[in-house]
Amino acid sequence: MTEIVTRKGKALGAPKRWAQRYAGYQGSGSDEKQRITEKLNGLTLEERTPERIDQIIGNDTWTRVSCDLCDDSVERAAALSDGINDLLVCESCLRAAEIALFSERKNPS
């Protein structure tokens, strides 16, 4: 099964994922985690942009989409799955694979 993972999609789900991750957190920085949770939960759907989520959290780890092949940060990637493992692949890597496949078909070794 293949689905498309986007920075926007990750941003939309970030408040819920953040709240689940830090629910009941009592460690170092717990006040800051709670403040971030409140800010994220206060956002409307329209306000949940990757840039706004990154600004509130202080980094892009909750909205980043990275290609597992080239390690580039991209706006979207295909999530290829065998039902157990997922592999995020960017458009450039998919195109390179497509070119290699079609090139091999035209010129088999």
Image (cartoon, rainbow, N blue to C red):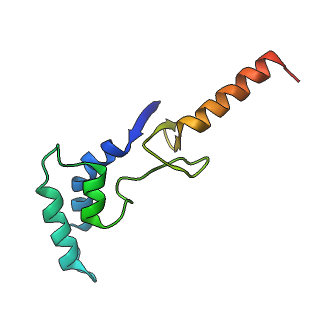
- Residue 6 image offset from top left, x and y in percent: 38, 41
Residue 26 in the figure: left or right of residue 73: left
Residue 21 in the figure: left or right of residue 81: left
Query: Is residue 53 something one can see in this rendering?
Result: yes
Residue drawn at 21 percent across, 76 percent down: 32
**Which quadrant: the C terminus?**
top right
- Residue 48 image offset from top left, x and y in percent: 21, 49
Above or below for 24 versus 50: below
Above or below for 16 versus 32: above
Query: Is residue 24 something one can see in this rendering?
Result: no
Residue drawn at 22 percent across, 72 percent down: 33
Q: Nearer the viewer, residue 76 or 22?
A: 76
Above or below for 45 versus 104: below
Residue drawn at 66 percent across, 32 percent down: 97
- Residue 107 image offset from top left, x and y in percent: 84, 19
Residue drawn at 18 percent across, 64 percent down: 37
- Report the residue that reaches farthest toward the right: 109
Q: Nearer the viewer, residue 61 or 47?
A: 47
